Amino acid sequence: MLRNASKGAVRRAVTELTQYPKPGEKIHGFTLLHSKHVPELELTALHLQHDKTGADYLHIAREDKNNVFSIGFKTNPPDHTGVPHILEHTTLCGSEKFPIRDPFFKMLPRTLSNFMNAFTASDHTFYPFATTNEQDFKNLMSVYLDATLHPLLKRSDFSQEGWRIGPENPRVAQASDTKAEDSKLVFKGVVYNEMKGQMSDAGYLYYIKFQEEIFPAINNSGGDPEKMTDLTYEQLKKFHAEHYHPSNTKLFTYGDMPLTDHLQEVDAQLSSFNRIQGDLEIRRPIEINNDGPKSVWVQGPVDPLVDKDMQWKTSTTWLMGDTTNILETFSLGIISALLMDGYGSPLYRNLIEAGLGTDWSPNTGFDNSGRVGIFSVGLTGVKEADLPKVKLALHRTFEEVHGTGFDKSKVDGYLHQLEIALKHKTAKFGMGLLHRLKPAWFQGVNPFDSLAWNDTISAFQTEMAKGGYLEGLVEKYLLNDRTLTFTMTPDADYGKEVEQEEAARLAKKIDEVTKAAGGEAEARAQLEKQELQLLEEQSKSNTQDLSCLPTVYVKDIPRTQEIIDVRDSKIENVNVQWREAPTNGLTYFRAVNLFDNLPEELRALIPLFTDSIMRLGTKDMTMEQLEDLIKLKTGGISASYFASSSPLDFRSSTEGISFAGTVLDRNVSEMLDLLRKLVLETNFDSAGAQSQIRQLLQGSADGAVNSIASSGHVYARGYAEAGLTNYFRIKEQVSGLSQVKLVSSLASRPEDEGLTDVIEKLKAIQKLAFSGSGNFRTAITCGTESVSTNEAALQSFLSSLPKSDQSSPKIPTPDFSRNAKTFFPLPYQVYYGALALPTVSYTSPSGAPLQILSQLLTHKYLHHEIREKGGAYGGGAYSRGLDGVFGFYSYRDPNPQNTTEIMRGAGQWAVEKQWTDRDLEEAKLSVFQSVDAPQSVSDEGMTKFLSGVSDEMMQERRGRLLDVTKEQVREVAQKYVVESLEKGEGRMVFLGEKKPWVDGIWEIKDMGISAPQEPEILDEDVKVAALGS
């Protein structure tokens, strides 16, 4: 929100080409290679090259205050040690200009950025950020450039982030009396633990092993734990010197800030380098020739929540064309969508609906991120006897599609979706553009070709007009058996074998240290000394002088928030909120129907209901026909469970179903008619309803353990919070561990038992969905020119809804008190934990200092203790102002005992801490990163509509946040953390492998895993921010 003052009374649009140099002209050490205005995307692109080093630079000028920067490097991994991934972490641990420990994390509370991160892709690594503040942009650019080009790369950083051997509990190195299990020597390291989890998950393991077969020229950039411990510190430094060089970099800037300012700063940083030969190699997948199909079989872990007879995963892959052919790549993407997107698609019908599997395999789809397109289709939840049937069904489907052709209306539906996507004004357009352009750019594709949207659509329509175009591509690439079929078989001993391999590798490494040190005692003393030295260096982190780091200031934050103008009206006795704004010809629809006294047995089935209405079809239309209409007439329709705490009383809450739709102004009536039809006319009594609902359940249950582990701290937090208020109790039923357990149990119900009881409850929800106009409210966001037509459409829609109120008897609120400590035994090798405490309502004066406290604890204490010292991938504190909760979490945590002590002691630490003015300043900046983050036009006014938080409430809280004092922070830490824990109000939850430390104090909750399973850890996006945000 903060920008420097005007650049003159009259400012030319940043997209105006005449203000920029002409191709061939030089500017601040760069030569402009190419420039182009792209009106359909409202942007101007400029491609430059650094004269001295050859660095590649793409600038996208657009009237968007949310500016983006990224520096990226081509990093083809030389082996499976994960050197690109470990380097991504260690570069951010200190640099020449900022020689402090961990400047990246130290910058988080010194910026107003709305995005900061770093990513390791298969063959490149990049470091992006986004901010609306011009000084902030300069600050972060300086830190990012120095971190990547001039990192310190200390040996201790390699040990912390990469790998080392040390006592399991880091405090052992500081203590004299320790337990044997605490002093056990283990492999440690943030990235090592991260990838240990990744490689133990069946979903990720399937994908990465598939990649090794189809693309052996690209090694595992994230790192295979079996190989990571072969990486040396010297190899890390050598890889940096060869790859993190301007001659091997691609820089990207986006937004409305001046290009000349960017170029001056970048040139100053790059000019000290001389040009070298960059890593320009474009690696390709294997050749699959006419010598017959290839088949590969590998073993993987068992999913304990899935039927033991449905544990196989299999896929078949075809190589497509060169992705530099933009038109063909776009067309193949359309074919992929036509073949498998939606329940009515031919591949879904012939594979999943036919019962051959429960869900798509992790590699399914058209992958155009490499130089050669890769098209894969596969299934999870396959029975061993059905494995050969999958490939036969694929071939048969392609033959059928080639013979009958693609329906033009279906193609038009996808083009309509693209039209709406172009018109939608998102707050994160720049970051989305970076992610879209970057993979092809690193593969040698001219980014200007990727931006030529209208040209590509026009060329596509020209080819379509000739007839048989898409069918010809199917014949060219898919009507053959030049394939790779990749199958993973379940191995009940897989987890044990992984553990045995690690134990043997650890013993070998310890033996090497023992021989070098002269004996076992000497080796242990040496390893514990190294751990102590690392702890001592980590301990300096909180006392370092950070004055070398740039910052923005709280005084620059406006005290008055930007007001979003909305108005209220009534139509058919229904409250309507209107937000009139430039929407590029789109209308955004929201509605909420609140339920009074919703029966307990219905609530948990609402997610299944909202899935079912997008699956079953109606009496007069199949789901395929409905899906085609949705694509042709809307940008998407959805329904979901809704709940909100009251801003006036966090112990009070409301619940119901929410509805949403995006549509071109001309199609609002059709969108509302479709929504009404889906909700009211879905046929739960059709002959295929039971089998279709069973498939939905099996698809959700397949990989449920993976979904928990991908956000394990969120599930732990949700269950802990469920013991505090009714809002959290009901939310946990529909989106937490309770929901996972319900879905898994229904999915595994024997077929002869049927689902009649479930269907009756779904029909009861259907009657409730649009009932009771007194509890129904809507919100419309549109341009002023569309208000009158939208009013008419909305009146017609509302008048068509059922008029009878559905009243239910008053239901007493169930007891939602929980044991103070709950443990879920789950097959993971690391842990996910949370501690939750009740606090105050949104309007309470204590809410602001609690929010500031959460940032202080995260950045000044918990990150340091849980991640740096403890080795967890993330940990922190949070405060949810609307919902009245304060809590702590840890993520991918190898030291849960240590973490529980840290969490329980954090409040007292905050009370005793002598906070400085700078500490408070940084915490406030951290809070306002989200408070003042840019919003998409579709989200404007939604906080008021959904939760009842008025502009006056938000303004009052804003002022309180800006005025929080150190004494207020200590007071809320004492009252709502220290004293709350003393009174037993806290709820702690951990997920993971049950070990002896989980004693009788803990309540053990079974997730329905009947047989003991070998420990494993499951899928998680490698790119999650390390603080778990």
Image (cartoon, helix red, strand yellow):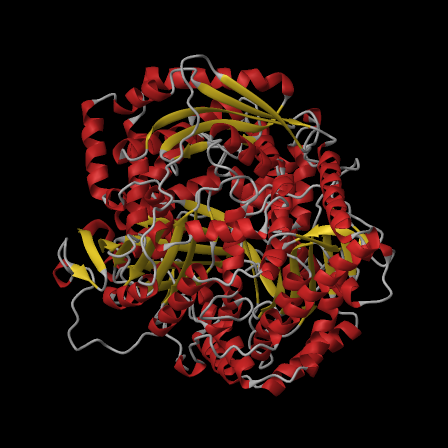
Where 362 falls versus 708 (above or below)? above
Residue appearing at x 38%, y 56% in the figure: 71
Picture quarter with the N terminus = bottom left
Residue 337 placed where, x, y %?
Answer: 38, 33
**Left or right side of 851 for 250:** left
Residue appearing at x 55%, y 77% in the figure: 843
Residue appearing at x 76%, y 53% in the figure: 517
**Left or right side of 781 for 852:** right
Residue 995 placed where, x, y %?
Answer: 81, 50
**Left or right side of 326 for 206:** right
**Left or right side of 104 for 479:** left
Q: Give the farthest residue toward the top.
A: 291
Q: Tell me which corner region of the image, top left, top right, bottom left or bottom right, holds residue 837.
A: bottom right
Residue 241 visible? The answer is: yes
Where 603 falls versus 976 (above or below)? above
Q: Tell me which corner region of the image, top left, top right, bottom left or bottom right, holds residue 527.
A: bottom right
Q: Nearer the viewer, residue 160 or 785?
A: 160
Residue 816 visible? The answer is: no
